[in-house]
Image (cartoon, rainbow, N blue to C red):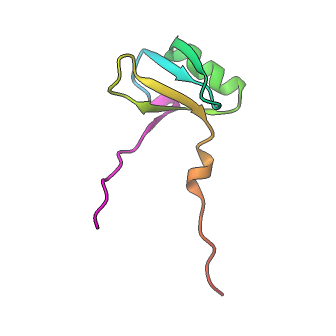
Amino acid sequence: MKGKQIAELNVNEEIKSKKLLVIAPDGVQVGELELKKALILAEELELDLVEVSPESKPPVARLMAVSYTHLTLPTKA
């Protein structure tokens, strides 16, 4: 069965939108912020800003750690 291909998400400086609806890691809505302020908040929290819904008005971005998406599977000995 073929799955849908998921487009890459824009992260941090890759985000082009000027204003975003920002969601905290716990799912609480932070509010509508300018991109620059949202990036500062992400840096202060040591998290990444990930644009999860670029087509929304305003686009939605979530504060999260994206490093967990780069896990590697252990190899067999």
Range covered by the magenta-colored residues: 1-14
Side of 40 where 20 appears, left or right = left
Side of 8 where 42 appears, left or right = right
Q: Does the magenta segment cover residue 26?
A: no
- Name which quarter of the figure residue 48 lies in: top right
- Check the picture and name the quadrant holding the C terminus: bottom right
**In terms of depth relative to the viewer, which is nearer, 76 or 27?**
27
The residue shown at (56%, 52%) is 69
Q: Is residue 8 above or below residue 22?
A: below
The residue shown at (42%, 15%) is 18
- Name which quarter of the figure residue 59 lies in: top left
Q: Does the magenta segment cover residue 8?
A: yes
Q: Residue 27, image x and y in percent? A: 59, 29
The residue shown at (29%, 67%) is 1
**In terms of depth relative to the viewer, which is nearer, 62 or 49?**
62
Q: Residue 15, image x and y in percent? A: 44, 28
Side of 5 where 22 appears, left or right = right
Magenta stretch: dominant SS?
A: loop
